[in-house]
Image (tube, rainbow, N blue to C red):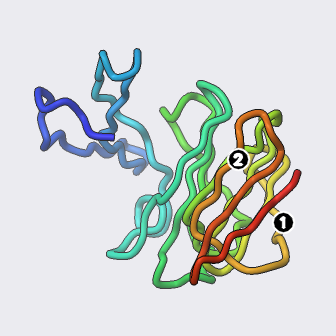
Amino acid sequence: MTCSASLPDTWPSLKTSSGVRLLPTCRREDFGRRVQRAAASVPPSRAGTLATGPAAGIFSVAFSDDSNGLVVGGDYSKETEAVDNAAVTTDGGRTWTLVKGLSGFRSAVAYVPGSARTLLAVGPSGSDLSTDGGRTWRVLPGPGFHAVSFAPRSPIGWAVGERGAIGRSVH
């Protein structure tokens, strides 16, 4: 998503007294007719935010409703490293809390339709499942994938990965 050209491209990041870095985000409402610039807090870590570096960051975001969501990512050059690679929000992205438990870099996350608390996160080194809104995770057996999606109102999910791999997940 890109912000409207009428908004400044160089909106500065801010830092609170507690060390939380506020980053500029773009918020679209009414199917893009209204665009707002807002600050969203990113949780602090050893580096000051989620995993940082030239190959690191947030790679996917999922929300179950207007308030509850999760971001996943990490460092794709360190596929099995699970450091500062997930955070949850309960206030629509205004603040984020780091969570642990993903078993490595994760490139995509999706809520299972019909469940506001079940998520599937995938990455090249494997997949993880949460049944509590992303606060805890369990490793799923099998290969890794790069993207995941669920059919609307269906517990059937599809994931794609290297060399044309396609996986089907039923929850």
Within 10 Å of disc 1 (Cα), the crowding (few <14, some 14-19, many 20+) is: some
Q: Secondary structure at mark 2?
A: strand
Instruction: Give the camera-side residue of 148 and 11.
Output: 148
Tag 2 residue:
150
Instruction: Give the camera-side residue of 144 and 12.
Output: 144
Lower sequence index among marks 1 and 2: 1
Is residue 28 toward the left or the right of residue 93 in the image?
Answer: left
Provide residue 153's location: percent of width, then percent of height. 77, 33
Provide residue 124's location: percent of width, then percent of height. 61, 78
Tag 1 residue:
138
The amino acid marked with disc number 1 is: Arg
Foreground mark, 1 or 2?
2
Q: Is residue 2 above or below residue 81?
A: above
Q: Is residue 165 above or below residue 67?
A: below
Provide residue 169's location: percent of width, then percent of height. 81, 59
Provide residue 133's location: percent of width, then percent of height. 76, 44
- Which residue is at a point 60% across and 81% down the rendered structure image? 81
- Which residue is at a point 15% across and 29% down the rendered structure image? 7
The amino acid marked with disc number 2 is: Phe
Instruction: Give the camera-side residue of 160 and 23.
Output: 160
